Image (spheres, helix red, strand yellow):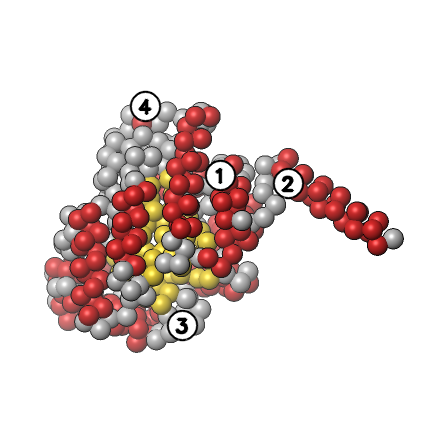
């Protein structure tokens, strides 16, 4: 009788896995294969946060244990007018994380882009004074971090403050306050939630001068007493740049500062990139051209294989350095809603994520699972 029950159980398990395979779906989630090596996550857009995009929500539950807002926690959405805060969507995101037992990252507090214009001008329309801008930073950070105290594991406190040549970006924060805006941001965040982790997050981190610039900046912040727990390496990759080797050099350089490394904003464009090293500054634009959009009807088998192998090479690197990495987060769920369809060229058909336009798992999902099993 016992043998009979075991045989039935095995047959049913086989049937379940075969039907999953027939649909092209892995039986396991990525998080079950990666286990406690590092968190594996995704950015969520509004329809996913509101749980109206059901297929995406199912994929998120199955594969990920970490989430971050793609947009709704940016200052222009949280505080579009001075003193008027809108938390509805961010609250839903925090509730989603708790409902499904996921780790929530806050993105982002101080960023030159997507900050409301009023932040940098006074009531007469003149540039804000140093004191006024510091006070606005303090209020924004204190209010936002304070609201999610104990619910957000860590914050991207400062985003994209370093240029590709390693110098500090000439943002309104730098112009008006000077470099102390950096330590002030970390100080305000720490005061608002002493238990939250605090991060520095940036793109194109594999460029040697940028790597050195970020190392210099983070080292001097830490020496000055700032709490920085991890550096987020945005992973907006294309097929030419960065190489796995250069990416690894930066990962090692950051880890040697005594902080953890997170691969944030991971996506791999399958399309030709006219300026491979140019980076993910949201303002960069390239004119549309047919040769830059070659796969409107789907990738060729060769292109898809090359894409999978390239992504897998990065996941192999993450596996080798999993003692230094605390989280790997994709920048979105399905190709259909990726920002890459409109960057740097508007209106292309790109294939940067691990779920296709029909929310089907791509073969690379199973490959990553096998690599980590
Ligand atoms: O993916 C995001 C896109 O939907 C927004 O329009 C854009 C501007 O807010 O920001 C994108 O996300 C950016 C992230 O917040 C910071 N690093 C670069 C990302 C891609 O631009």
Q: Dot 1, how many residues are within 10 Å of its Cα: few (below 14), some (14-19), or many (20+)?
A: some
- Is the distance from the Cβ of mark 1 to the nearest ligand 1 atom less than 8 Å? no
Nearer-the-camera pick, 203 or 31: 31
Mark 3 and mark 1 lie on one chain; the one further toward the N terminus is 3
**Picture coordinates of residue 206, whole percent (x, y):** 26, 46
Q: In this view, does 107 lie to the left or right of 115?
A: right
Residue located beneath label 4 in the image: 290
Q: Is residue 92 visible?
A: no
- Is the distance from the Cβ of mark 3 to the nearest ligand 1 atom less than 8 Å? no
Nearer-the-camera pick, 26 or 290: 26
Mark 1 and mark 2 lie on one chain; the one further toward the N terminus is 2
Q: How far apart are marks 2 and 3 (CA)?
A: 40 Å
Residue 293 vs 16, above or below: the answer is: above
Mark 2 and mark 3 lie on one chain; the one further toward the N terminus is 2
Name the element at disc 3. loop
Mark 4 and mark 1 lie on one chain; the one further toward the N terminus is 4
Mark 3 and mark 4 lie on one chain; the one further toward the N terminus is 3
Mark number, residue 20: 2
Q: How far apart are marks 1 and 2 (CA)?
A: 15 Å
Q: Residue at x 76, y 43 (%)?
A: 11
Mark number, residue 149: 3
Whether label 2 touches label 4, CB < 8 Å: no
Whether label 1 touches label 2, CB < 8 Å: no
Mark number, residue 364: 1
Q: How far apart are marks 2 and 4 (CA)?
A: 37 Å
Q: Dot 2, how many residues are within 10 Å of its Cα: few (below 14), some (14-19), or many (20+)?
A: some
């Amino acid at each position: 009788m016992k043998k009979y029950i075991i045989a039935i159980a095995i047959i049913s398990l086989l049937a379940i896995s075969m039907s999953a395979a027939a649909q092209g779906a892995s039986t396991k989630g990525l998080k079950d294969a990666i286990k406690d090596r590092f968190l594996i996550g995704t950015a969520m857009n509004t329809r996913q946060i509101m749980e109206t995009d059901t297929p995406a929500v199912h994929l998120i539950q199955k594969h990920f244990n970490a989430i971050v807002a793609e947009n709704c926690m940016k200052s222009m959405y949280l505080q579009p007018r001075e003193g008027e805060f809108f938390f509805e969507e961010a609250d839903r995101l925090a509730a989603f994380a708790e409902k499904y037992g996921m780790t929530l990252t806050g993105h982002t507090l101080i960023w030159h882009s997507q900050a409301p214009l009023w932040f940098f001008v006074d009531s007469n329309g003149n540039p804000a004074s140093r004191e006024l801008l510091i006070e606005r930073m303090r209020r924004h950070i204190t209010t936002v971090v304070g609201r999610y105290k104990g619910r957000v594991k860590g914050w991207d406190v400062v985003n994209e403050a370093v240029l590709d040549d390693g110098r500090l970006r000439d943002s309104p924060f730098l112009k008006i306050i000077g470099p102390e805006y950096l330590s002030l941001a970390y100080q305000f965040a720490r005061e608002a939630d002493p238990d939250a982790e605090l991060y520095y997050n940036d793109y194109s981190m594999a460029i040697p001068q940028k790597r050195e610039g970020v190392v210099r900046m983070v080292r001097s912040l830490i020496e000055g007493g700032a709490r920085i727990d991890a550096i987020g390496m945005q992973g907006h990759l294309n097929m030419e740049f960065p190489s796995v080797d250069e990416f690894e050099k930066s990962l090692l350089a950051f880890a040697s500062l005594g902080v953890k490394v997170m691969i944030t904003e991971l996506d791999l464009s399958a399309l030709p990139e006219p300026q491979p090293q140019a980076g993910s500054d949201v303002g960069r634009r390239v004119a549309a051209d047919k040769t830059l959009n070659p796969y409107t009807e789907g990738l060729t088998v060769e292109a898809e294989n090359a894409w999978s192998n390239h992504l897998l090479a990065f996941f192999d690197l993450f596996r080798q350095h999993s003692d230094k990495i605390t989280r790997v987060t994709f920048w979105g769920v399905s190709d259909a809603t990726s920002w890459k369809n409109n960057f740097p060229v508007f209106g292309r058909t790109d294939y940067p994520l691990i779920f296709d336009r029909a929310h089907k798992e791509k073969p690379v999902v199973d490959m990553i699972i096998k690599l980590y099993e």
